[in-house]
Amino acid sequence: MKKRLRPAELCEYLEAAHGIEIKPSTLATWRCRGGGPPFVRFNRTPLYPRDLADAWADEKLGEPITSTSEV
């Protein structure tokens, strides 16, 4: 069964699991403009599948580097 998180829960999860600090208001903006993690809706409530949020975070973080000149 896929675990789905509400926006506030996702913010807590991303910080704990990936070290990414995001506010629920930022997620709301991304839901309108795009660029955030994939979500589904249950009535009016946005729910974020945890596995897709993990994949989104990994994509945004990119590969580890050893020097700023590698960017």
Image (cartoon, rainbow, N blue to C red):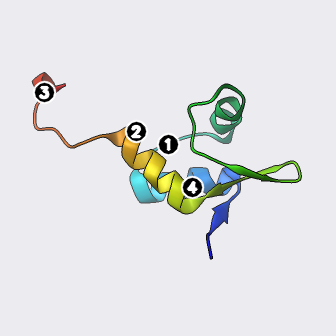
The location of residue 71, given as percent across then percent down, is 19, 25
Mark 4 or mark 2: name the one nearer the start of the chain.
Answer: 4
C-alpha span from label 1 to label 3: 24 Å
C-alpha span from label 4 to label 3: 31 Å
Foreground disc of the pair 4, 3: 3
Mark 4 or mark 3: name the one nearer the start of the chain.
Answer: 4
The location of residue 43, given as percent across then percent down, is 89, 53
C-alpha span from label 4 to label 1: 8 Å
C-alpha span from label 2 to label 3: 17 Å
Mark 2 or mark 1: name the one nearer the start of the chain.
Answer: 1
Residue 70 located left or right of residue 44: left
Say which residue label 1 marks. Answer: 21
Q: What residue type is labelled 2?
A: Lys
Q: What element carries label 4?
A: helix
Say which residue label 4 marks. Answer: 12
Say which residue label 3 marks. Answer: 70
